[in-house]
Amino acid sequence: MLHIGDSFFVNSEALAITDVDALDALCRYTSLSKDELGKGLHNPDFIAELTRLINQGYWYFEE
């Protein structure tokens, strides 16, 4: 994931800006928790985008 200016990208695909801080956390961290994602966890649009990225294999749950 890449953050350039006001834009976020995954494999050259621009993402909709659903929550700037939470998307920035996805760029910065390889391991995430509610602390990094913050208010984004209360944003249905961000949750939908995060779910899509998880389903595509970009992030996964630690066993």
Image (spheres, grey):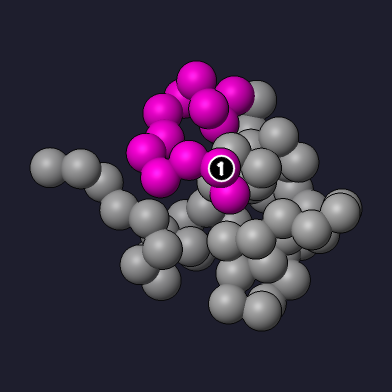
Indicate yes or no whether the magenta region holds residue 34: yes
Q: Secondary structure at mark 1?
A: helix
Using a 10 Å C-alpha cutoff, classify the residue at mark 1 as few (fewer than 14 neighbours), some (14 to 19) or many (20 or more): some
Q: Is residue 24 above or below residue 14?
A: above
Q: Tell me the residue at 30%/53% (across/down).
A: 60
User: In this figure, which residue is indicated by the disc labeled 1?
Assistant: 28
Q: Which residues are magenta?
A: 27-38
In which quadrant is the C terminus drawn?
top left
**Is residue 43 something one can see in this rendering?**
no
Instruction: Tell me the quarter of the picture where residue 15 sits.
Output: bottom right
**Number of marks in picture:** 1
* Residue furthest out toward the right: 6
Relative side of 5 to 38, left or right: right
Q: Is residue 48 above or below residue 43?
A: below
Image location of residue 61, percent across then percent down: 26, 46
**Is residue 35 something one can see in this rendering?**
yes
* Residue furthest out toward the left: 63
Q: Tell me the residue at 66%/79% (across/down).
A: 12
Instruction: Tell me the quarter of the picture where residue 40 sits.
Output: top right
Q: Tell me the residue at 50%/20% (across/down).
A: 35
Relative side of 21 to 51, left or right: right
Amino acid residing under circle 1:
Arg
In which quadrant is the N terminus drawn?
bottom right
Image location of residue 14, percent across then percent down: 74, 71
